[in-house]
Amino acid sequence: MSNALSYLPGHSQGTLFWKSWQRVFAVGFLVLLPGAVQIDSASRALAEPDALLADRTPLKLPLTKPKLVVKKGRRELLLYSSDKLVRTYHVGLGLSPVGDKVRAGDRRTPEGDFYIFIKNDKSAFYLSLGLSYPNAPHAERGLRDGLINRSQYETIMRALKARKAPPQNTRLGGDIYIHGHGSSSDWTWGCVALENEDIRELFDAVNVGTPVTIQP
């Protein structure tokens, strides 16, 4: 066994040896099952658990009426063209991933209906798509709960009506983006994070104004 194995964080040589035999046993056991003609796809799934998340053939651009749906519980972002699913991406969320965003600093990824108000190709997180948070329901709740005043509420509503960026500096929080720099964990302050190659593809596929729905 190579000494290089001892430098892999969190893995002893014995652990790696056992995991290798676990995988061999799992694939070999499938061969013994009736109808094991699917062994090829099964072994690929063992080697690449996320391989079936997306069809990686190049997208045919431009898309027709693109829209995005984020499913927080499944850590997925779905890209549609004319209501046809054309791509699924794995995502990371805010550090507090469960529940709707309520206020600045709660580190939650907001839920509801939004639109892309800006495409930023100079983002600190590779590339980013700005989301129109806070939306009308967030503004209404914030006004009711005393987080914003009537003037702030009306400013938010005017921006949403004009399909512009709503104020980003109220007590409701802001600066919610779909961006790059990795999707392996929930690490953002409320944004939706993708791998850089995925946000590159998505950035090229959507425009300002594209609708985005974020579901629990």
Image (cartoon, helix red, strand yellow):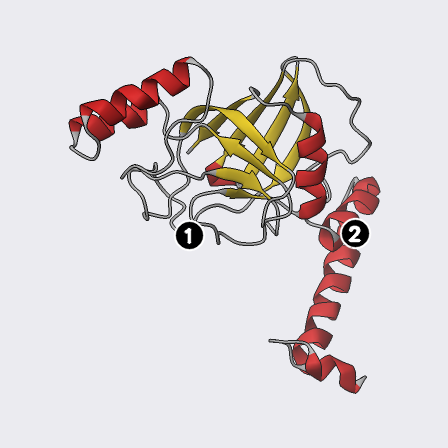
- How many residues crowd around disc 1 within 10 Å: few (fewer than 14), some, or many (20 or more)? some
Q: Is residue 50 visible?
A: no
Q: Which mark is residue 79?
A: none
Looking at the rendering, in which quadrant would you find the C terminus? top left
In the rendered image, residue 130, in percent from the top left (x then y), is placed at 52, 33
SS class of the residue under badge 1?
loop
Placement of 5 over or under 193, stated as above or below? below
Q: Which mark is residue 32?
A: 2
Placement of 212 over or under 27, stated as above or below? above
Number of dots carrying numbers: 2
In the rendered image, residue 47, in percent from the top left (x then y), is placed at 75, 55
Q: Residue at x 19, y 28 (%)?
A: 149
On the picture, is 73 further left or further right than 13?
A: left
In the rendered image, residue 42, in percent from the top left (x then y), is placed at 76, 46
In the rendered image, residue 178, in percent from the top left (x then y), is placed at 55, 38
Q: Residue at x 23, y 30 (%)?
A: 142
Which residue type does callout 2 highlight? Leu
Placement of 156 over or under 187, stated as above or below? above
Q: Is residue 129 visible?
A: yes
2 or 1: tag closer to the N-terminus: 2
Name the residue beneath numbered marker 1: 95
